[in-house]
Image: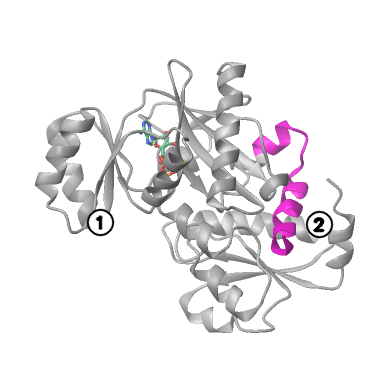
Amino acid sequence: MDFTALKKFLEDKKITVIFGGWSGEREVSLRSGRRVLDSLIRQGFKAEGFDLKRENLHLIRPGFTDVALIMLHGRPGEDGTIQAIFELHGIPYTGSGVEASAIGMDKITTKYILKAHNIRTPEYFFIPLWANLEEFGEKALNQLGIPCVIKPRSEGSSLGVRICHTEKEFHDALKDTRGKYGDLFVEKYIKGKTVTVGILGTGEESFPLPVLELRVKGREFYDYKAKYTKGLTEFIIPAEISQHSTKELQEAALLTHRVVGCKGFSRVDAVVDEDGNYYILEINTIPGMTELSDLPKEAEAMGISYDEVVLYILRSAFE
Ligand SMILES: Nc1ncnc2c1ncn2[C@@H]1O[C@H](COP(=O)(O)OP(=O)(O)O)[C@@H](O)[C@H]1O
Ligand SMILES: [Mg+2]
């Protein structure tokens, strides 16, 4: 991809990398943001960082910067809230817009969209806050059986994701999840490989990266600790799935990015079962960009450098 025009256009403009925030993923965001900032400086851009906190939120107003590169994970940076502030102030910002960000943050709405486009996703049972937990829990159990997965409606980094092997575990986890997160859902457990597919670009020009398989050592699944501790996860690229499965999954992931309306970059998480069928779990509208992160690894496997990924992200502010 030729980024000469973009580089020329941004020559004398100020780029601000927004990172930090106050979600459960603050630490990851700081790491992602600093890496992206280093890359921009290395590439000769006029860039600086902004560690978003409640106390400095008011500094974001018209004229705050020429371009905001949003590298926040979780709320309020990945769900459309910050995007709306930049939108109102007329400041160009990177990545998905307000609507796509809000959809991506919400795993239930994402599932509605996946179903509408015939994209395979695990069977699930939604248990909203207003529902009787016992009654709905019983219904979910009857429909999905054990093992099953309990998840908060809107979280990330595997926070709150619980695989339940017994009915007791299920009921305990249900109560605990409701208490901590409110809206939740139960999902059918898919035995298979944990995989993820990054997407770069916007709309018609978007394309999938190679499929990355995450093999966790000594832990039950790809949980928070496995995600952010060096050495706990083995990264296999390309994933050890057939060519046919790979192609199907990449097409589904790309379609997910497009129908949700994502811009610039995103990462689609999935499980591939023993027969090679993919199941899309979710889309991350601001995937991690740390030194351990998946999307930069996938890009590299395709010959796209970290710096170039940053340019794809940057360009999305003007698409
Ligand atoms: N239905 C499922 N079947 C099997 N494993 C799952 C299922 N749902 C989640 N997982 C495991 O948990 C991880 C995190 O789930 P995911 O839906 O991607 O939530 P998060 O937003 O927290 O990343 C997945 O990468 C996968 O390893
Ligand atoms: Mg995930």
As drawn, 160 above or below 16: above
Left or right: 145 as drawn, with respect to 209: left
Q: Going 38% across and 31% down the picture, which residue do you hit?
A: 221
- Residue at image mark 2: 42
Residue 310, how many percent across, how many down?
72, 53
Give the residue type at disc 2.
Arg
Q: Is residue 78 visible?
A: no
Q: Is mark 1 within 8 Å of ligand 1?
A: no
Q: Which residues are magenta?
A: 297-319
Give the residue type at disc 1.
Lys
As drawn, 197 above or below 276: below
The CA distance from mark 2 to mark 1 is 42 Å
Q: Going 21% across and 57% down the picture, which residue do you hit?
A: 129
Q: Secondary structure at mark 1?
A: helix
- Residue at image mark 1: 180
In the rendered structure, does residue 159 fall within the stretch colored magenta? no
Left or right: 204 as drawn, with respect to 158: right
Q: Going 60% across and 39% down the picture, which residue do you hit?
A: 254
Tell me the number on the disc at residue 37. Answer: none
Q: Main secondary structure of the magenta part?
A: helix
As drawn, 73 above or below 22: above
Q: Is residue 53 visible?
A: yes
